[in-house]
């Protein structure tokens, strides 16, 4: 049986979701992407998820998703010193496409996949389990992490999936309800899975109090040391220090969450553009920030003294 201890350890930290930078012609900018991933790794991030939502997963072509996977694995493999970084490739769409993407991730050298919440409007408990089994059974040697956004899925369903597929090792839980998360994790098996707070830093303190040991982050693209500061505070059980970080990032994360996350990625790319790290371009259905919001992002970046 495969030992997933290194993958489980990487999930219990900051799980970075890198942006996908585009060039002036709207193509994936490979050199800039590698530089952004390198910046994350240099800051101590040990789990990187290409093809996540902050990567604009649903706007990328299959070829771009494959390239992003290969670039991330190559950059992580080039580290050479210190603790190895784990690559967790986002996969999704129909079951066959998700399974094939997981196989591509394995062939590229990744050791984990994150399965996007099925977007089909008709999702049953049994069908949710079957969807994830299709992916997990295609790549038994990879760690598999379901991305759970629906409050309708029950902890018992995840428990059944875990019984059938030992390689389902963690969960990215992104339902904005800490009490529900606490109950779900205990119904599924608190110690069986690594619990990742999938709503990033603003929810991390509450979810850590209920059993999470890692959190995802798009903010980490902009201010990686701010995200790692929160992680260290949470690991130490210092919720006062964690909330000091929370207060510092609240305005930025509120901009991302506004209008049902309409500008989630645009805010991050605007901040990166202010730092001279990538262009601010996003693809539809996202859109660049209007002027007043760009000014607010600029003020936050200046306040954080990142330049």
Image: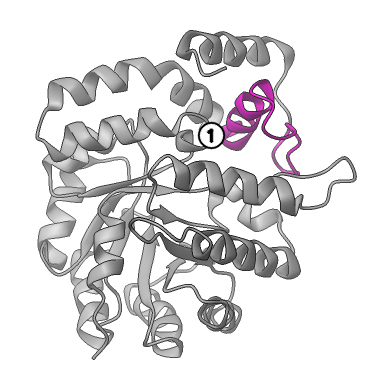
Residue 251 locus on image (x, y percent): 44, 16
Outermost right residue: 25
Q: Quadrant of residue 224?
A: top left
Which color scheme is applied?
one colour
Q: Could you say which is closer to the camera, residue 68 or residue 177? A: 68
Residue 275 locus on image (x, y percent): 64, 23
Residue at the spot x=60%, y=66% of the render? 69
Name the element at disc 1: helix
**Residue 54 visible somewhere in the drawing:** no
Q: Quadrant of residue 301?
A: top right
Residue 96 lies within the magenta run: no
**Residue 73 visible somewhere in the drawing:** yes
- Which residue was labeled with disc 1? 261
Disc 1 crowd rating (10 Å Cα; few below 14, some 14-19, many 20+) is some
Q: Could you say which is closer to the camera, residue 195 or residue 178? A: 195
Q: Is residue 62 left or right of residue 189?
A: right
Find the magenta span and give its range: 261-287
Residue at the spot x=39%, y=21% of the render? 249
Residue at the spot x=27%, y=49% of the render? 214
Q: Quadrant of the N terminus?
A: bottom left
Outermost front residue: 81
């Amino acid at each position: 049986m495969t030992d997933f201890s290194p993958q489980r350890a990487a999930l219990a930290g900051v799980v970075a979701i890198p942006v996908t930078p585009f060039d002036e012609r709207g193509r994936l900018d490979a050199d800039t992407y590698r530089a952004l991933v390198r910046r994350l790794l240099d800051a101590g991030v040990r789990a990187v998820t290409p093809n996540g939502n902050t990567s604009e997963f649903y706007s990328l072509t299959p070829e771009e998703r494959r390239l992003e996977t290969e670039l991330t694995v190559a950059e992580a493999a080039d580290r050479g010193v210190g603790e190895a970084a784990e690559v967790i490739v986002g996969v999704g769409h129909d079951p066959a496409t998700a399974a094939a993407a997981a196989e591509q991730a394995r062939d590229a050298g990744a050791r984990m996949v994150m399965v996007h919440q099925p977007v089909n409007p008709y999702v049953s408990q049994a069908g949710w389990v079957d969807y994830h089994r299709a992916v997990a059974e295609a790549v038994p040697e990879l760690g598999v992490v379901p991305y759970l956004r629906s409050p309708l899925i029950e902890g018992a369903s995840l428990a059944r999936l875990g019984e059938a597929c030992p390689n389902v090792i963690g969960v990215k839980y992104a339902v904005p309800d800490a009490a529900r998360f606490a109950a779900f994790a205990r119904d599924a098996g608190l110690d069986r899975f690594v619990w990742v707070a999938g709503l990033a830093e603003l929810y991390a303190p509450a979810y850590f109090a209920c059993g999470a040991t890692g959190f995802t982050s798009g903010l980490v693209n902009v201010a990686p040391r701010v995200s790692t500061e929160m992680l260290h505070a949470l690991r130490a059980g210092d919720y006062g220090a964690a909330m000091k970080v929370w207060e510092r990032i609240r305005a930025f994360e509120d901009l991302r969450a506004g209008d049902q996350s309409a500008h989630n990625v645009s805010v991050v790319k605007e901040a990166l553009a202010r730092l001279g790290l990538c262009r601010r371009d996003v693809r539809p259905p996202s859109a660049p920030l209007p002027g007043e919001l760009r000014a607010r992002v600029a003020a936050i970046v200046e306040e954080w003294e990142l330049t």
